[in-house]
Amino acid sequence: MEMFLCCYIRPTQRYFVNDKYFDKNNPGPVFLMIGGEGPADPKWMVKGAWIEYAKFFKALCINLEHRYYGESRPTEDMSTKNLQYLSSSQAMDDLAYFIQEMNELYKLPKDTKWIAFGGSYPGSLAAWVRVKYPHLIYAAVSSSGPLLAKVDFMEYFKVVVDALREKTGDDDCVQQVKLAHQQITDLMKGQPEIIEKEFKVCKKFSDASPDDIKNFYSSIADDFADVVQYNEDNRIGANEEYRNVTINTICKILTEGKEKPAYKRLADFNAIIMNKNNQTCLDYSYSNMIQELRNITWGGDEARQWMYQTCTEFGFYQTSSAEVEVFGNAFTLDFFIQQCEDVFGKKFDKDFVSNAAAWTNSKYGGVDIAVSRVVFVHGSVDPWHALGITQTKDNNAPAIYIKGTAHCANMYPPADSDLPSLKEARVEIQQYLADWVGLP
């Protein structure tokens, strides 16, 4: 792996630097990769579309980790009281402070142009920080950013279902998913032991609470969500064996071998996901999930931090409400609001979360954001595009909607197997940057 620099600022926030393509005598722009709801991955410092752009523009590449994620730990623990300092607004203030510190550290010319890059939640941050600090961020590439805070994100599974149809060209796969869930529901009433065996659950349904059952159905649906959201991508660090688990993989399992009941075919797919996650049995226990989310010590899987942000800023709860016939209606909005209350306290009820999301939209503008020199990029297969800008409203803030691609596909390293639409999108992004930044 090529060499790059890892440092800390303030001294609790981690960042990485790659100055390989930067010419100090004839400096180009600074590319700032914004961290999100997970650790900053140093592999991004030598791979990805932004590195290809950096070679062209002779850019200095910097990746700033988001506060409270990875090794950026500003408080002694993650108690609810301490999490009050975790927000998108605070993250943008960190970016502003960081830029000014880097300008001094690297003695950058005053006219140096900083370009923000981000995917998913950081894609939203890339657009928002351009609005909040236009004198520091000159332009941005916002990939798969959900700009609209929405508590009941029922559209998510609607896009999942649409993606199954789009990628297979017919309705058979969706119908098999629907049939499998109907069969599961029927068997759960009279012969639950059959589902226990097929889905390798960790405890019997006779010992399960109503919340456990909701969590069971939510877990099955999440299997589809994960595969669809990252369908056929070239994710950095992804396991090669499971990168090949695609929508077509799912649908082949579900539509072939119909001598076997649909629920068994769905269980076969679930077994693949369990192997991927190193699960020996399917733990659908609601209390176990809540106990893990209540853990306030550092070093976990970071789900607590992101849940706090959803409860206090965004919502984004992927409910079954829009696709009841396909996935059932076990995981409604109340199921997710209850999690906010059970993890963080009764204060975080439905009114609190709804008001928080409304405030976020009021503060940032949702999909009516007023901004320039930001390119918004989304894929048609990615469920998150439902909360983003997919059509150009202003030529100074163009949208690129890539048919057939999934979450953040444009950010990953180019591959020969990429769809022509994806290859064209990467070229189009570079052209926008060239127009805005100018050539080095």
Image (cartoon, grey):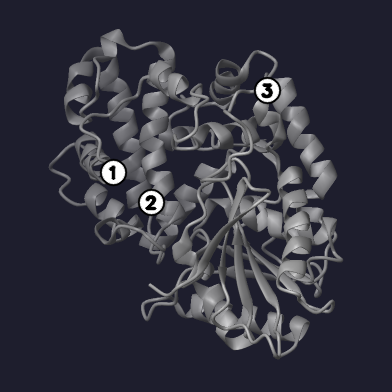
- Measure how far apart labels 3 and 1 are at the Cα level: 36 Å
Position of 388 compared to 417: left or right?
Answer: right
Q: Secondary structure at mark 2?
A: helix
The x and y percentages for residue 244 are: 28, 61
- Screen quadrant of the N terminus: bottom left
Precedes in sequence: disc 2 or disc 1: 2
Give me the disc on residue 246. Answer: none
Q: Amino acid at mark 3?
A: Lys
Q: Which residue is mark 3?
A: 81
Instruction: Please name the residue that numbered disc 2 is placed on.
Output: 227
Horizontal placement of 133 versus 406: left or right? right
Residue 376 on image: x %, y %: 68, 65
- CA gap, disc 2 and disc 1: 9 Å
> Which amino acid lies under the numbered mark 1 shown in the image of this protein?
Ile
Residue 201, placed above or below residue 51:
above
Q: Which residue is mark 1?
A: 273
Helix, strand or loop for disc 1: helix
Asked whether the viewer can see residue 317, the reply is no
Dot 3 or dot 2: first in sequence order is 3
- The answer to whether residue 287 is left or right of residue 96 is left
Assign a secondary structure to mark 3: loop
